[in-house]
Image (cartoon, rainbow, N blue to C red):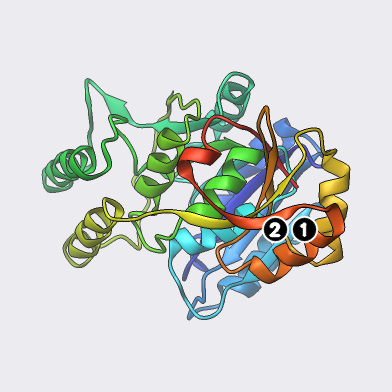
C-alpha cells in the first residue's frame, strides 16, 4: 500500500535531476518505504527520461513516464496525479528549489486540509532574488485576484500537497496546460469548497528555470483571462450514494479507466471521468446500473472525494 506519492513534472531537466534528488533523498528516508516517486517527462528534448531512470532507478516504488509531445507543466502534473497511487500527493519541481525539509509538514497538514500549498510569502509578498521579478510577482498576484478571485498570495509556489481525492477531481476538471495551471487548480479548489491552507516554506533560486519572465507573461495573461470564461462540464456516472469504493474501482478497471474519483453526496454518488471519458463511462454505467450524464462544479462541490 502506497501512502504518499511525490509527483515531479520534468522538461529538459537532465542537468538538474541529480542535484534535485540529493536534496530530496533525506526526506524520502524520513517519509519511509510506503512512498512512491512519479516522474513525468513532458516531451523533453534532452535525456531527461534516461537521467531520471538512472538517478531515481534504485527506488522501490518509482514510475517514470513520458508525455509526447511536450504539452506543458500543467498537463504533466495532471498526468502524474492521475497515475499516483498514494492517498497523499505532493507535487514539486525537479530541482527541489522548495526545500524538501518542508514536505513532511505540508503532508501532515492534510490531516485537516484538502490542499496544503507551500507559501514563500514574507511580510505580505513573495520576494524573488531580483527587484524586477518581485515586482512582476506583485503584478501577477493582482491579476490573479482580478480574474480568478483568489486571495491566496503565493499561487506559483513549486510545491503543493493534496489529498488524493481532491487532487484527482481537480486534475480531471482542469484544462490549462502551461504555467497558469497553478491558478486554475487553486481556483477550482476554492469553487469546489475544498479546504486550503498555505504552509510556510523556504526556497532557493536554482539556476536553469524554464520560466522566462518576458515571453511567458503574455501567455499567463491569456490563460488568466480564459479562466474567467470557462464552464466546466465532465461526464459522470450517477450511482447510488452507498456504492462501495471497491465496487466502483472494479468497474473502472474493467474498462481500463484510470485517474477517476468517486464524489459521494447524501442523495447519490458520482464517478467523475476525464472530459473524453464518455465511452468508458458507458461501460461503467452498464456494470453498476448507473446513469451516464454530465456534471459541473455546482453539483460536484462539497462532496466526499475518494480516488479510484
Visible in this render: residue 43?
yes
| Residue at image point 67% right, 61% down | 55
Q: Earlier in the sequence, mark 1 or mark 2?
A: 2
Q: Nearer the viewer, mark 1 or mark 2?
A: 1
Tell me the number on the disc at residue 285: 1
- For mark 2, what is the residue? 56
Residue 223 lies, with reference to residue 11, above or below; the image says above
Q: How many marks?
A: 2
| Residue at image point 42% right, 26% down | 198
197, 12: nearer the viewer: 197
Residue 120: where, in percent of width, then height?
34, 31
Secondary structure of the residue carrying tag 2 is helix
Please state if 269 lies on the left or on the right of 233 as rendered.
right
Residue 192: where, in percent of width, then height?
47, 36
Please state if 102 lies on the left or on the right of 254 as rendered.
left
Residue 21: where, in percent of width, then height?
60, 51
Give the quarter of the image for residue 113.
top right
Please state if 50 lies on the left or on the right of 151 as rendered.
right
Give the quarter of the image for residue 74.
bottom left
Tell me the number on the disc at residue 199: none
Circle 1 Cα neighbour tier, 10 Å, few/some/many (<14 / 14–19 / ≥20): many
192, 296: nearer the viewer: 296
| Residue at image point 46% right, 39% down | 298
Circle 2 Cα neighbour tier, 10 Å, few/some/many (<14 / 14–19 / ≥20): many
Residue 119 lies, with reference to residue 148, above or below; the image says above
Amino acid at each position: 500500500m502506497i501512502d504518499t506519492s511525490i509527483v515531479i513534472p520534468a522538461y529538459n531537466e537532465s542537468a538538474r535531476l541529480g542535484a534535485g534528488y540529493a536534496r530530496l533523498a533525506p526526506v524520502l528516508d524520513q517519509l519511509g518505504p510506503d512512498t512512491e516517486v512519479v516522474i513525468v517527462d513532458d516531451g523533453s528534448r534532452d535525456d531527461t527520461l534516461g537521467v531520471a531512470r538512472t538517478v531515481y532507478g534504485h527506488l522501490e516504488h518509482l514510475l517514470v513516464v513520458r508525455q509526447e509531445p511536450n504539452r506543458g507543466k500543467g498537463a504533466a502534473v495532471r498526468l502524474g496525479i492521475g497515475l499516483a497511487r498514494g492517498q497523499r500527493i505532493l507535487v514539486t519541481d525537479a530541482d527541489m528549489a522548495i526545500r524538501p525539509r518542508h514536505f513532511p509538514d505540508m503532508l501532515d497538514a492534510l490531516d485537516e486540509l484538502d490542499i496544503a500549498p507551500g507559501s514563500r510569502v514574507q511580510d505580505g509578498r513573495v520576494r524573488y532574488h531580483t527587484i524586477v521579478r518581485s515586482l512582476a510577482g506583485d503584478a501577477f498576484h493582482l491579476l490573479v485576484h482580478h480574474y480568478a478571485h483568489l486571495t491566496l498570495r503565493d499561487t506559483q509556489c513549486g510545491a503543493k500537497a493534496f489529498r488524493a481525492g481532491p487532487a484527482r477531481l481537480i486534475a480531471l476538471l482542469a484544462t490549462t496546460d502551461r504555467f497558469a495551471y497553478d491558478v486554475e487548480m487553486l481556483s477550482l479548489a476554492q469553487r469546489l469548497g475544498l479546504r486550503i491552507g498555505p504552509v510556510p516554506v523556504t526556497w532557493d533560486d536554482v539556476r536553469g528555470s524554464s520560466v522566462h519572465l518576458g515571453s511567458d507573461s503574455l501567455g499567463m495573461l491569456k490563460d488568466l483571462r480564459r479562466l474567467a470564461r470557462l464552464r466546466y462540464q465532465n461526464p459522470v456516472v450517477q450511482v447510488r450514494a452507498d456504492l462501495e469504493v471497491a465496487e466502483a474501482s472494479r468497474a473502472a478497471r474493467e474498462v481500463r479507466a484510470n485517474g477517476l474519483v468517486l464524489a459521494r453526496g447524501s442523495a447519490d454518488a458520482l464517478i467523475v471521468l476525464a472530459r473524453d471519458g464518455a465511452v468508458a463511462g458507458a461501460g461503467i454505467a452498464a456494470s453498476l446500473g448507473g446513469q451516464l450524464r454530465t456534471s459541473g462544479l455546482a453539483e460536484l462541490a462539497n462532496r466526499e472525494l475518494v480516488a479510484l
